Image (spheres, rainbow, N blue to C red):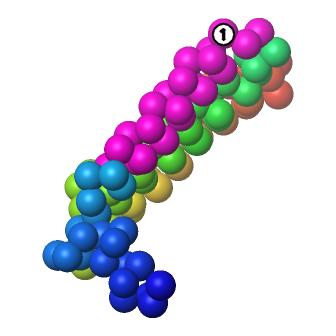
Amino acid sequence: MSDSTAHDVAHGADGHPTWRTYVVVGVILTAITAVEVAIFYIPSMAGMIVPVLLALSAIKFVIVVLWYMHLKFDSRVFSRVFFAPLFLAMLVVLGMIILFKVLPKYMI
């Protein structure tokens, strides 16, 4: 199959994904959500639960923004509008974790 034919099959005639692609993305998002719920109930993950859940949430955010909001097919400027605040929010959350969880251990 040539590159253009494979692209047309995966993305339809107008360049956007077909309904099968959305089903696959939905299954991936469901699987990530199931992993998030399972991690919450694993006692050995208690120390790592926040960073792992933050990472999985960021992955789900990126998937939703790219596929369901069609940013994968739009200009890169629109992608930067979404990914810059995500990066800033992650820095703020990590800063708060360090400030309130890590630093108090060293201040006593």
| Nearer to me, 105 or 28 | 28
In-image side of 88 versus 105 (left or right): left
* Res. 85 visible in picture: no
Q: Is residue 23 magenta?
A: yes
Please tell me which residue is depicted at 54% across the width and 24% down the height of the picture: 34
| Nearer to me, 101 or 108 | 101
Res 50 → quadrant: top right
Magenta span main SS: helix
Vertical position of residue 36 compared to residue 9: above or below: above
What element does badge 1 sit on? Answer: loop
Vertical position of residue 44 compared to residue 14: above or below: above
Q: Give the amino acid type for the residue marked by disc 1 in the picture.
A: Tyr
| Nearer to me, 14 or 82 | 14
Please tell me which residue is depicted at 56% across the width and 18% down the height of the picture: 37
In-image side of 39 versus 47 (left or right): left
Res 16 → quadrant: bottom left
Start and end of the magenta stretch? 22-43
Q: Pinpoint residue 58: horizontal percent, then vertical percent.
A: 49, 45
Give the residue pinned by disc 1: 41
Check the image and name the residue furthest to the left: 14
In-image side of 70 versus 44 (left or right): left
Check the image and name the residue furthest to the front: 1
| Nearer to me, 86 or 4 | 4
Please tell me which residue is depicted at 53% across the width and 32% down the height of the picture: 31
Q: Pinpoint residue 86: horizontal percent, then vertical percent.
A: 41, 52
Q: Quadrant of the C terminus?
A: top right
Res 29 → quadrant: top left
Q: Pinpoint residue 75: horizontal percent, then vertical percent.
A: 25, 78
Q: Pinpoint residue 15: horizontal percent, then vertical percent.
A: 23, 75
Please tell me which residue is depicted at 34% across the width and 72% down the height of the picture: 9
* Res. 7 visible in picture: yes
